[in-house]
Image: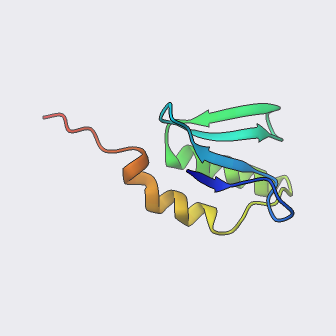
Amino acid sequence: MSYARFSDESDVYVFMCVCGELDCCGCKLQAGKVSFASTEGMLEHLAEHRAAGHLVPGTVDQELRDDDADNFPPSGGA
């Protein structure tokens, strides 16, 4: 699932990788792909993009929060 793709309105490409992490592909902050094992990690990273003046679609943060439980299900340990 892609949360943002490169376009005239987006300088980031963010998606949920089949490996179970959120990826910032082609990251302009860290030259390449950056992966996060939590929604909060990606949200902090997107804040860094915004602080650097990069375009990040306004809907991405809420979409990531909405999908958090699906992307990173709580452990069912007893």
Report whether 36 appears left or right of 20.
Answer: right
In the rendered image, the vertical position of residue 56 relative to residue 46, given as above or below: below
| Image quarter in which the C terminus is found | top left
Colouring used for the render: rainbow
Task: Identify the residue shown where x is 51% and y is 35%.
Answer: 18
Q: Residue furthest bottom?
A: 58
| Between 29 and 8, the one nearer to me in the picture | 8
Q: What residue appears at the point 30 percent right and 44 percent down from the top-left corner?
A: 74
- Image point (76%, 51%), residue name: 12
Q: In this view, does 37 lie to the left or right of 47?
A: left
In the image, residue 22 sits, relative to residue 56, either above or below, namely above
Residue 58 percent coordinates (x, y): 68, 69
**Left or right for 67, reference 6:** left
As drawn, which residue projects farthest toward the left? 78
Q: Compared to 70, does 63 lie above or below?
A: below
Quarter of the figure with residue 24: top right
Residue 49 horizontal/vertical position (percent): 77, 51
Describe residue 14's horizontal placement relative to residue 38 as left or right. Answer: right
Residue 75: x percent and y percent?
A: 26, 38
Q: Position of residue 48 (x, y in %)?
A: 74, 50
Tell how many labels.
0
Which residue is painted at 69% across and 52% down in the image? 46
Image quarter of residue 47: bottom right
